[in-house]
């Protein structure tokens, strides 16, 4: 069974540009989560999808971030326009059901905004 | 507000030692607690998941305990090996559907 897959693994963009990160969850996992870790800080929750619906987006920093999960399969996280403080590692995770089950994480996308 | 703290922040030990990594959290209302391992430049690998009703979980040389009432968990690594070198992260799942992470313990095991 394939794990959670994220693309790209690294991205370097200039301030003001747009970047789109992609996450393919484990097949059959309805729950998909985005997290990020900025330099020197702990990993923080961004948002949670159940199938194609946003269940909780309380962690999204601002309206420059847009997450979608069309059809309830893969998800994209777009940052537009990117700012320097957006640099960090963006992780995606998926789980089969809510609450008490294990979350499986992807390898992350390292985003550097220069 | 739930906060998760891990101590020590870094640990360097010779091969063969038994280790204890500590995790504390401020709110005991959690579904479960999960320990992860992160290798440099890699993703998070789940090590152990302890449900709120459980006291401990074991996998190979790893044993994790949970004392929900006191807001503590420990990860015990027996007979450490250089391949155990990584960052170990503790995360709790509060009543809502998200994980709250600690800042991690960076472990180095030297031969």
Image (cartoon, rainbow, N blue to C red):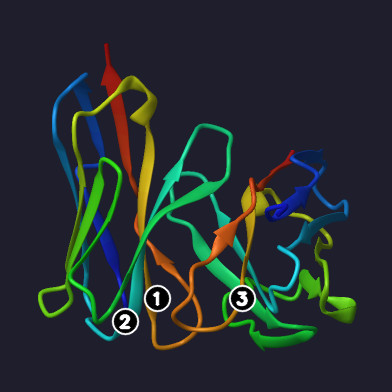
For the point 62% across and 55% down, the residue is A91
Return the residue nearer the eye: B67 or A44. Answer: B67
Please, is residue A98 above or below residue B45 in the view?
below
Evaluate whether residue A97 shows in this view.
yes
**Image location of residue B79, percent across then percent down:** 19, 29
Q: Nearer the viewer, mark 3 or mark 2?
A: 3
Q: Residues within 10 Å of mark 2 (few under 14, many from 20)?
A: many
Residue located beneath label 1 in the image: B93
**Image location of residue A63, percent across then percent down:** 75, 76
Horizontally, residue A101 falls left or right of residue B24, namely right
Give the residue furthest to the top: B111
Tell me the SS state at disc 1.
strand
Chain of the residue on which disc 2 is drawn: B
Residue B30, numbered circle: 2
Mark 3–mark 2 CB contact (< 8 Å): no
Q: Residues within 10 Å of mark 3 (few under 14, many from 20)?
A: some
Mark 2–mark 1 CB contact (< 8 Å): yes
Marks 1 and 3, how far apart at CA: 15 Å
Residue located beneath label 3 in the image: A96
Q: Quadrant of residue B77?
A: top left
């Amino acid at each position: 069974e394939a794990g959670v897959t994220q693309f790209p693994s690294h991205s370097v963009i200039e301030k003001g540009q747009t970047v789109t990160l992609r996450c393919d969850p484990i097949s059959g996992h309805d729950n998909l989560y985005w997290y990020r870790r900025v330099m020197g800080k702990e990993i923080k929750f961004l948002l949670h999808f159940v199938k194609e619906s946003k269940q909780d987006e309380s962690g999204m920093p601002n309206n420059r971030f847009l997450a979608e999960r069309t059809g309830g399969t893969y998800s994209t996280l777009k940052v537009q326009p990117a700012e320097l403080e957006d640099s960090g590692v963006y992780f995606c995770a998926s789980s089969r059901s809510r609450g008490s089950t294990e979350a499986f994480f992807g390898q992350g996308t390292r985003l550097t905004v220069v | 507000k739930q906060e998760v703290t891990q101590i020590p922040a870094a640990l360097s030990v010779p091969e063969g030692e038994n280790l204890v990594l500590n995790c504390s959290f401020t709110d005991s209302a959690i579904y479960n607690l999960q320990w992860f391992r992160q290798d440099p430049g890699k993703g998070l690998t789940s090590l152990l998941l302890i449900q709120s009703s459980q006291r401990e979980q074991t996998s190979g040389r790893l044993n994790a305990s949970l004392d929900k009432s006191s807001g503590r968990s420990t990860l015990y690594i027996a007979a450490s090996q250089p391949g155990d070198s990584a960052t170990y992260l503790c995360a709790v799942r509060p009543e809502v559907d998200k994980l709250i992470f600690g800042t991690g313990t960076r472990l180095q095991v030297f031969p």
